[in-house]
Every structure is written in C-alpha cells, then in structure tokens.
Amino acid sequence: MKGFYVIVLTAAIMGWLAAQARTGKVRKLGNDWLFPPVRALQAIFCIVLLMGTGFVVWAYRGPRTDRTVGISIGLLFMVFSAVTWPKALHLSVSGVHQRSWWGGWKRMSWPQVSEAKEQPDGSVVLRGNNVNIIFTQYHAGREQFLEMTRDNGLLIRML
C-alpha cells in the first residue's frame, strides 16, 4: 500500500511542476527570449545534489566498512543532478541555443533545424547538425515557444 502512496505523491508533484511551468514567465534578454525551467524543479535538483553531498560526508565520517558504498551512492546522486540539471533555452531571431551538460553551448540557426518532434511526455526536441535541443514540459512559456518556432517556419510533429 505504501507504493500506491508514493506513486500518487510523485504524480501530484509532477503535475504541480507542470502547472508551475504553464504559469511561468518568459524573460526578454536583449534580443533573446529566455525560457527557464521552473524554480521548483531547480530546487528539487538542488536537494538531490545536497543529498548526494550528505551521503559522501556521512560515509567519509562513518564506519570504514560503509565508506565505499556510501561514497559511491553519494557521487552517483551528485553526478546525476549535475548532468541532468535542467537548462534554460534561448530563442532569438537567428536561432536557438541551450547549455549542454558540460557547460558549453549547443547552437542551431533556424535553417539548421532539420526535425522538430513533440515527445509523448510533452517535451519538444529540435534536431539538426548532430545537436539536440530539448524543451521539456517543465520550462516556462510553452505556448510562446511553440508560437515562436512556428513563426520561424518549423512544424512540430507529434510522435
């Protein structure tokens, strides 16, 4: 019965995050439009990062026999949150760009976008020149994003 409550709680939190994204505001930065992930999602990732740090500290200060497992679990949590941390999308007249997981930029001009698909989970993937840019359901301004992609000649296919 506990599993049922975990599923219900997880579904409620994910639904709440999606609702936050629907009411989230898009920001104008110079000539770019910034589509950030919602702050609540960033807070969850920050909690996971802190939890991983706590595991590492606990394992290092704890019994010697538990160090390897505790540090490994903590490092997995830390690496997971660092690699999958939600990144903001930047749209401009010339194209779209987003930070990659290692900190560099993924850039595509509008003519370079070869494919735009909406995934079953509600995320939109823009592909072109060996670059994938993902707009998740937890980014602010979904309707404005879809409108701006249409204005730039992209037709988003449903998967």
Image (tube, helix red, strand yellow):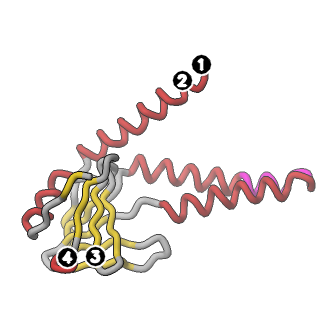
Horizontal relation, residue 77 to residue 115: left or right: right
Q: Specify the label residue 119 is tagged with.
A: none
Q: Which residue is mark 1?
A: 1
Horizontal relation, residue 98 to residue 109: left or right: right
- Which tag is nearer the camera, tag 1 or tag 4? 1
Q: Specify the label residue 95 is tagged with.
A: 4
Dot 3 or dot 1: first in sequence order is: 1
C-alpha gap between disc 2 and disc 1: 5 Å
Q: Quadrant of residue 6?
A: top right
Q: Are marks 2 and 1 in contact (CB under 8 Å)?
A: yes
Question: Is 118 contained in the magenta span?
Answer: no
Q: Quadrant of residue 81?
A: bottom right
**Magenta region: which residues?**
55-63
C-alpha gap between disc 3 and disc 1: 46 Å
Reply above or below: 88 against 41.
below
Kind of residue at disc 4: Gly
